[in-house]
Amino acid sequence: MSITRATRRIAAPIDRVFSAIATPENFLKTNPSKIVAIDFLTEQREGAGTRFSETRLMNGKPNVTELEIAEWVAGERVRMVTPELHGTVWDTLFTVAEVGGQTELTLQMEARTTRWTARAMNRLIRGMLQRAVEGDMDAVKQHCEHGAPRGPEASSDVSVGGRRSAQRTLKGPRERAALRSCPAVEDPRCGRRVAAVHRDRPVPRG
């Protein structure tokens, strides 16, 4: 088992910080240059039992991770868990607490596996995961203290059961090139034709 941790002090109310990390649509808004789409797999959009897939760019390529909100205590903590990915279950816990008039946000991401090959791979990517987590935490801090980005990058791409509720325009050349390189496949959840994306690597949620 390996654990990745990160903490930030944020000059924003605790409710604002909790909403930013606990609600998938709001988390997308904290880092729209990396997180490019959210697909809800349940009708509910927040709270324990919510399932969704998150698409983010990694090295210019879209990667999808499915997550379930396993625990939700408003204004205190939220825990999100992936299905087993190549022998590893990724369990991410966010907690918030008021400290000195600010909000302290802590992330703990636990990688659980019983396979030695998965343990070896997790050790190899540990530095990459730490950098990704730190980047996400910086993005949450920036968003909560200064607001969402302006312009096209602030738009979002969110769907429920395959029904698109908002359209995000991919303006960056890396994003457009990455999605053009993906062949179209049929999404078994909704029967629509979508771009195939890479699912070979875990995408840290945090």
Image (tube, rainbow, N blue to C red):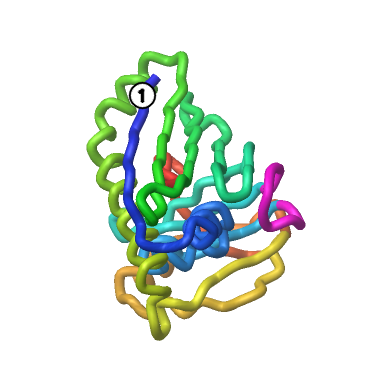
Determine which quarter of the picture holds residue 60. Answer: bottom left
In x, y percent, where is residue 44?
A: 74, 56
The one nearer the camera, 25 or 177, is 25
Residue 71 visible in the picture: yes
- Do we see residue 181 in this rendering? no
* 48 in magenta: yes
Q: Residue at x 33, y 28 (%)?
A: 122
Please report the bounds of the magenta region as a residue range: 42-50
Question: In this figure, which residue is indicated by the disc labeled 1?
Answer: 2
- Front residue of this view, candidates 41 and 11: 11
Q: Main secondary structure of the magenta part?
A: loop
Number of residue marks: 1
Q: Residue 194 appears in which quarter of the rendering?
A: bottom right
Kind of residue sitting beneath label 1: Ser
In the picture, measured across the screen, residue 164 lies left or right of residue 153, that is right
Viewer-nearest residue: 1 or 180: 1
For the point 66% across and 74% down, which residue is it? 165
Residue farthest bottom in this picture? 151
71 above or below 161? above
* Direction front: furthest residue: 100
Q: Secondary structure at mark 1?
A: strand
